[in-house]
Image (cartoon, rainbow, N blue to C red):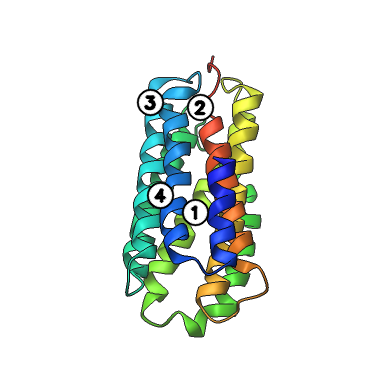
């Protein structure tokens, strides 16, 4: 995974579209294979939901690379991925009113990014808002797994780290795609994206009580 990701990032830096089109989906596919077969699994439903999320992410990777910039299709695919992760992170971790305060940091961070780029979103305002709400909820549910006595510390830490990195990665994507790029934005976005996916995939290791 690391080697494939490195080749993809080098391809971006060299403006090598063929290399990027090969190694970007390949990296996500390798992570998917790891979650599906190569890692000692947690309960089957949790693993299945994570694999579904990775599969939707792979579809999103491909859609965002297609000519014409299929941004709406990419958003839909990653929205489905986050819904799968959200359900996975909610297993054995029931929602409680006392947990709602922990949602605020995620909402505040994403709200600042959206407010900054609101005028540039154009027709994508509604889907981006829906997507943002889902990814904030996904990260929040990952964070709340730490309160459950039924979830091993290791799988909790992998999951919450991956979810938080996904929020960061998508924030970089919004800035880059909607008029506020910065040096190395694409490379940093890819690195945080694959780190997020890898950590979420690693959260299927071990056995939940």
C-alpha separation, residue under disc 3 versus residue under disc 2: 10 Å
Tag 3 residue: 45
Q: Which residue is mark 4?
A: 57
- Residue 204: mark in rendering: 2
Between discs 4 and 1, the one toward the N terminus:
4
Secondary structure beneath dot 2 equals loop
Measuring from the top left, give residue 124's x and y in whole percent.
Answer: 38, 75
- Which mark sits nearer the N-terminus, 4 or 3? 3
- Label number found at residue 135: 1
Q: CA distance from mark 4 to mark 2?
A: 17 Å
* Above or below 184: residue 61: above
- Residue found 36% across the figure and 43% down from its top: 55
Q: Nearer the viewer, mark 1 or mark 2?
A: 2
Q: Pick whichever of labels 3 and 2 is earlier in the sequence.
A: 3
Report the front residue among 81 and 140: 81
In the depicted structure, whether residue 133 falls above or below residue 32: below
Label pair 4/1, CB-CB below 8 angstroms? no
Residue at x-position 49% and y-position 32%: 94
Residue drawn at the location 60% of the way across and 71% of the way down: 113
Tell me how far mark 4 sits from mark 1, CA to CA.
13 Å
């Amino acid at each position: 995974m690391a080697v494939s990701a490195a080749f993809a990032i080098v391809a971006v830096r060299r403006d090598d579209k063929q290399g990027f089109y090969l190694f970007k989906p390949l990296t996500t596919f390798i992570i998917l294979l790891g979650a599906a077969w190569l890692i000692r699994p947690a309960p089957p439903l949790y693993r299945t939901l994570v694999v579904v999320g990775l599969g939707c992410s792979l579809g999103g990777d491909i859609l965002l690379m297609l000519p014409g910039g299929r941004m709406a299709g990419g958003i839909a695919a990653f929205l489905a991925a986050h819904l799968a992760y959200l359900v996975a992170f909610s297993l054995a971790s029931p929602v409680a009113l006392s947990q709602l305060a922990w949602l605020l940091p995620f909402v505040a961070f994403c709200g600042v990014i959206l407010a900054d780029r609101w005028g540039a979103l154009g027709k994508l305002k509604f889907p981006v808002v829906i997507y943002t709400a889902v990814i904030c909820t996904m990260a929040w549910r990952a964070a709340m797994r730490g309160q459950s006595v039924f979830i091993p510390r290791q799988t909790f830490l992998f999951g919450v780290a991956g979810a938080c990195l996904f929020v960061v990665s998508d924030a970089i994507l919004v800035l880059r795609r909607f008029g506020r790029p910065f040096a190395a934005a694409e490379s940093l976005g890819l690195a945080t994206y694959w780190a997020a996916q890898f950590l979420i995939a690693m959260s299927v290791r071990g056995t939940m009580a």
